[in-house]
Amino acid sequence: MPETSVIVQENTALRTQLTPENLQFWDQLEPLLRQDPRLQDEETLQEYLNTQLTALVAAQKQGRTAAAYYHGDPIAAAQRLMKGPKRRPWWWTHDLWFPLGLFVVGLVLPTIILPAVPLQLLAVGVQLVLLVVALVLGIWLTPNLGPRGRAIGWGVIVVALLVALNLVSRSLPAVGLVHITRKGGSIFLLLFAVVLTGLILWDQRRHPDSWMPALIAALWIMTVLGLLARMAPTAGLMATSTGTLMIGAGTLMGDVSILVSGWHIWRQRQALRMTHHSDD
């Protein structure tokens, strides 16, 4: 099959990147993995070998040997791998962090820019549940639809989610109010932005194609607006119509930055995918 031949070529290229010591380890490990009854299908086998080779090459770049990476000799490594699950579900990836990050940066932070406006925990909790429901629906629909159907399906889900989130924010009673104070709130917002940015950059090092960097600009725009609303020289201005205009413009800029960065990341992913298939 064409797909299988592409993966075989990728595996061959990855194998050539191994050091002699790691190559000897791999040449002993691969025949043992082929004995796994769950990997009898050639495409499944090659995909699994691709996953292992990619991880091994990454570990090698960090200065680790194959024995150190697999915590033992090839026989022990094969036994350990053959006991584990064959593959994770297709949707169980690091991309699942992005919707949660988008929820916090795009929905929660804009609501607490002004210190006089409290965070409503009930509303946030219900909105988070709606987000999870939308993700479950999208994950269920995706494998059952073609490319056009997936685009339409996800579009409908996103629009319905936005409408539902807006209705929740307007209709639920003010329960579980949390006020983000001026001094303490400033420290909290700044620390939150620094920590989240650090986590995003750490995730990007582990997953270069991560969606999470698309949130950084919006995160800091919201943080700066929150700090302006809490610092003495600008706090009064942010409570006026000019401040409201600044908050609206900043929120819009944050949303646009997410869309632009997300589009750029998507194009990079598409280009990488096309590169992987160019040898076919």
Image: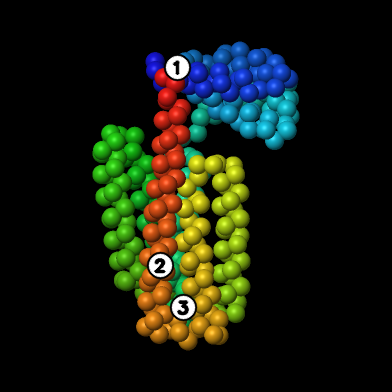
Tags 3 and 1 touching, CB below 8 Å: no
The residue labelled by disc 1 is 5
Please provide percent x and percent y for residue 65: 73, 27
From the viewer's perspective, is 80 left or right of 50?
right
Q: Residue at x 55, y 85 (%)?
A: 232
* Circle 2: residue type: Thr
The reply to whether residue 216 is in sight is yes
Q: Residue at x 64, y 28 (%)?
A: 56
| Residue 114: image tag | 3
SS assignment at label 1 = helix
Q: How far apart are labels 3 and 1 at the CA level?
A: 57 Å
From the viewer's perspective, is 195 left or right of 111?
right
The residue labelled by disc 2 is 251
Q: Which of the marked residues, 3 or 1, is nearer the chain's N terminus?
A: 1
SS assignment at label 2 = helix
Q: What is the crowding at mark 1: few (fewer than 14 residues within 10 Å), some, or many (at least 20)?
A: some
* Circle 1: residue type: Ser
The reply to whether residue 177 is in sight is no
- Image position of 91 with respect to 185: above or below: above
Tags 3 and 2 touching, CB below 8 Å: no
